[in-house]
Image (cartoon, rainbow, N blue to C red):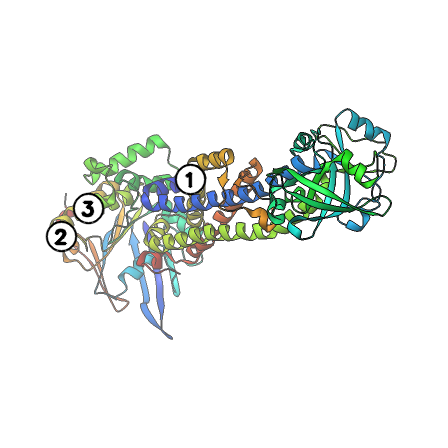
Amino acid sequence: MENGQIVNVSNLVKHFPMGGDHFVALKGIDLTFATGEFTGLVGPSGSGKTTLLNLIGGLDSPTEGDVSVLGMQLSGSSHGARAELRRSSMGFIFQTYNLLPVYSVYENVEFPLLLNNVPADERKKLVTQAIEWVGLTDKMKSRPAALSGGEGQRTAIARAIVKEPTLVLADEPTANLDAENSHHVMKILVRLNKELSTSFIFATHDEKVMGYLRRILNLVDGKIVKDEIVENPEFKG
Amino acid sequence: MLTFKLAIKNLIGAGMRTWLNVLVTAISFILLVFMTGMYQGMDAHARQVTIKTEIAGGAYWHPIYDPADPFTLEDAHGVPPQPVIDLVNTGDAMPVLVAQASIYPNGRVMPVIMKGVEPRQTIVDMPTANLLEYEGESIPVLIGSGMARRAGVNVGDTFTIRWLDANRTYDADEGMVIHIFETENIKIDFGQIWIPLARVQEMLGMPGEASYVSYGQEIAALTETDGWIHRDVGYLTRDMTVLIEAKKPASYILFGILLALAAMGIFNSQVLTIFRRHREIGTLMALGMTRSRVVGLFTAEGGMNAFFAFIMSALLGGPLFYWTATSGIPLPMDYSEMGLIIAQRLIPVYPFALFVSTTVMVSIIVLVVSYIPSRRIAKMKPTEALRGKVA
């Protein structure tokens, strides 16, 4: 990592096949993200936000260009190496929460630690702490089906941050939440960003989320048209 | 280890869906064992009945005796060698004198094999002692119920018996049915009449002679037989062994069909599971599971499904296997008319090897049919899985 940069994107192009032709989702993106950022990729549907987030997360491969995350070049890396990077250093928050349906809240949050072979004692401590952070101590044994939308997304957040990753990628984390829950969730994420120095990259077009961001990258038709640093009162003090 | 823990957790967590899959696999397993047990029971029963009622421990044949060739019977007789006679004298063997004859029940002619047997014998399970109860002038005849039906005779009925004696002269006399016995062995029933040995020897003019001598099941084979041929149980049941071997492909086909049904059920449920759980698969990959590990997880779930199915098979099938193996299954019809040695109560046989081989085979099939659809996961892109697209 150079100069505290955790993500470095250069000349990133992504095509998707569409019929006999292809759709260009990203058109030569150059970007860097530093440690501890709270950044949003903002833009209308089809602008390439989720595609860029997936490429940073190593969930997809670019057509051209390079993505380097935490010092690892993703373009030429194997599936296994990218999985290892996600397992050890990244957290994901999805629009539809994507909780494992047969596991309880506790088990869902515990899952990334199991994958990382964290010892049982430490696992218990970390899971309990993560669930406390998101305020779901009374729902530990509940299954996802028994949770409200806000509780489901808070569980997903606890799962994303339980291993205290360096980078969390959140794809439309508030899209399925009402205003109250959206603010609640964002406040939790801001607090985690402050306390754990975890970097957050959001893909969103939700105005409520934008109110919490410190850096906003506007994407239109696969290009970054604006990159602005925002003075956000949530981060003062 | 984690993969297995997760597989168990996923299966138990899936509740009813898991248990329905397990039930279907268990039913297939039970059917596989039950059907194979039935087949083996039929074979074992036929062999057991034949040994008990006809073969005993084996036999010494007159050098030219060949039961499959009636033309040899005329000359296939002689005084057995002394060591064999010694066995007869101690009650450990019974001589049988065989000849072709004709009977004339109800005015029609029927060719038969006439067999002289010692009424006091205890070597085979036949009610020959009934022949001792008759003290009249006619030839006492013991026949099986199948023969009685075909000849249209009952106990006390008489018919003419005609035979060719040692001097190649046709003789005839009146025979009387003394007893009709029930047997599952058609080979001692259809086309056979049983008469006291001494009487047959007298009728044929062959005193002290026999065509073969059967010996008891516990008796060791003799080394000195003076030209008489020793036939062991293996030889005497060879036609049955051939028949059983000939039936095997049919049983394999049935076994294969049942196995295929079980495999298709598991394959289908596995494909459906992967289709339904694409988002979960994408999530697992996003959380850092490698594709091979996800494939391993789903294959392990299939394997655990089989393991649960074996436990359920033991719980559901155990009492069924025990009950059928001890009480038997009553069959709806008498198969002896079809020339088959099949018990009226069929007792399936479930050897330990059957459970082991079925378990191994079902396990392999389950793992294969769990793995094949799971391989699709390896082709999935995490982003497509998360979006709900399946490769």
Q: CA distance from mark 3 to mark 1?
A: 46 Å
The reply, left or right, for residue B26 in relation to residue A178 is right
Contact between labelled residues 3 and 2, with CB atoms less than 8 Å apart:
no
Residue in the image at 82% along x and 47% along y: B74
Q: Quadrant of the N terminus of chain B?
A: top left
Which x, y percent locates residue A132?
Answer: 21, 36
* Type of the residue with mark 1: Phe
Q: Secondary structure at mark 3?
A: helix
Which x, y percent locates residue B213?
Answer: 77, 35
Q: Is B333 situated above or below B376?
A: above
Residue wearing tag 1: B308
Q: Chain of mark 2?
A: A
* Type of the residue with mark 3: Val
Residue wearing tag 3: A190
Q: Nearer the viewer, mark 2 or mark 3?
A: 2
Q: Secondary structure at mark 2?
A: loop
* Type of the residue with mark 2: Asp
Front residue (pair B331, B85)? B85
Q: Secondary structure at mark 1?
A: helix
Label placed on residue A178 = 2
